[in-house]
Image (cartoon, rainbow, N blue to C red):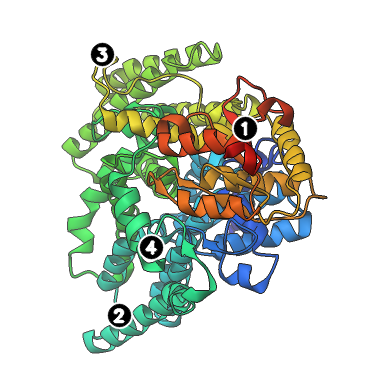
Amino acid sequence: MLSSKSNSTQRIEALGLVLVIFFAVCLRFYKLDAGYSGLGIYSATSLNVGTSLHNWFFPSIFIDGSIIADKPPLFFWIQGLFLKILGPTNLALRLPAALCGTSCVLLLYLILKRTYGVLTAFIGGLLLAVAPIDVNFSRGVFLEPLTSALILISIFMLLIGVQRKQVKFFYIAAAVIGLAFMSKLWQGLLPVPALAVFVVILRWEKWGVFLKTAVVSFAIFIVTALAWPTLVWFFDSSYNTVMHSENIWDMIFGWNLFDRFGGLQYGSTHDSSWFWFLSGPMQLFLGVTFIPLAVVGVWKTLNDLPGKVFSKTINDEKLVPCVGLIWLIWLLICVIGFGGATVRLSSYWASATPAICALSAIGIVALAKDRESHSQWQRAISYLILIAGLLYICEALSNVIPLWVGYKYLSYLCLLGSVIFPVFLLLKPGVDSKSYRKGEILLNFGLFITLVLIFTSNLSITIYSLTNPRNDTLGRIGFDQMPVGFGGGSPDSKVTPEIERARLRGTVITAIVRTEPYALTAAIEYIYKGKGSGKYLMGTDSYNTAAKVAYHAAEYSPHIPRLPILPIYSEYQDTWITSLEDLEKITTHGELKYILTSKDMKSMNFEFWTWLSGNFEDVTILSGLPFNGELRVFKLLERDVRN
């Protein structure tokens, strides 16, 4: 009889895991080959790594390997392998992210199962499987899914190491975290403070032995994380420069740390409030995942910390709250790091999604199974968070009612849930009542309905995004958030010159993305036929334009040799890449005959535009690009005409 019940439990657990993986796979692989290749920097770099050993070790957006990309090579190596096998296709670009995203769901399930149990693992995995922002990035050409997968592997290794008391798993975790750094640099280190706290609290060795283990682990991390940039630094004569940076260390610590997380700004204006990621356009893609269950999970974790983590209990009793502490610190670092950032890229927040979903599962299961062990005021705060969270989701969904009538009913159901939930609490019989257990069952039913509403809200947003892909700038880049405006500052607020300049940079960056593929193909073909024996296929206004042309030509015009492309201006840092003096020499020697540029470069750099107008003629219509479009094609004038 006991064996039969055990087999039945195992079948239910297996069925739950299959359901989680089913959602993860279906949502991440649905029409995976559709859409656009994005800005092209990552795609072109990945395509180049398979062209030579030099380009494999020094990943560059250019075929000549002259300028190293602004990220480490791990992601480019993996994506480059798929491009080598499948060719320059959307499927090859997106398949690595989809596989990594699915792996993240499985890894989160396994971590939660070993600590909080099967039910928490099921809910956490299910929420991550349908989370809109995670699905979005798991279907793109971005580095975040690989980074998140490596982070979760390192957590899993540390967990096994603590449970088995074997330091070799610590060493594996250190190496994997080093690989996460090699994927997306500082985003790969987001949970490292949490992991350090985890291993310190749960150490089983004496301090002297433990410090030796920590030193060895740190050494393994340093070697894994910094071996490549150190070698690049030694061989700096093998390339001209590093994208956006003076050298490889400036790329790591300057551009990707202080510049990007600090003062980088381009594109539209954002609200200055710290929690705008919960009230602005991310409200639907992140907010309904974040609120309210993750906040309940945070509250549950904070309540457990003093009694277990900081007590003298054995490590087995500390393990569960310490894992909760990992999710809590990971999320806290994201809020501190991204909440007040000038650039609120949704890619940053994709790094926090596993922690959000883990805390959400912890929160709802704690209320359903462990609430009797909590004090009355702790339960009261948890219920208030749930009620406020349902109102938040109701308001968020009301913003997208014009997109689909179903959101109106979902919004009403969330509002109804927030009204009915207090009735459950007020009418629930007391402990001394014979109907107490029935009241508890009824309350659990209310919690289940809340979970279903939040799950349905996330799933509906994800499905809408999949079945109604955006064809505007964000959609073509891959940020398929719903096309609804959420404000972002007062419409009457003064636009400063800095903000205006940032918007201009954003326009230049994305001009080539808004160009129709067939028109860009025609322009590339036209330029190739007329370039003669010049060294460069063309000059471009920016890195993004150069990268997009390089990848687009390989995808749509494979008969064209992969010639170098000359970028002229850094659209991110607002500085020259190729000076006017160098342009003069290059054009005089016949190495460059065509320049492709955004029309907004006239405002971005009038000096360049003046030189361009005096030395080149506008052949946009002849190239096949629309004359009223955002991109212009210029052809070099004959020398006597210029004189």
Instruction: Name which of mark 1 and mark 4 comes first in the sequence.
Output: 4
**Residue denoted by label 2:** 204
Q: Are marks 4 and 3 in contact (CB under 8 Å)?
A: no
Closer to the camera in the image, 519 or 418: 519
**Badge 4, how many Cα within 10 Å: few under 14, some, many 20+?**
few
Which disc is residue 284 wearing?
none
Q: Nearer the viewer, mark 1 or mark 4?
A: 1
Which marked residue is nearer to the observer: mark 1 or mark 2? 1
What residue is pinned by disc 1? 617
Q: Nearer the viewer, mark 2 or mark 3?
A: 3
In percent of width and height, residue 202 lies at: 29, 72
Q: Amino acid at mark 4?
A: Glu
Q: Which residue corresponds to the image point at 69% horizontal and 44% vertical from the top-left?
A: 552
The image's mark for residue 492 is: 3
The residue that mark 4 highlights is: 246
Image point (52%, 50%), residue name: 583
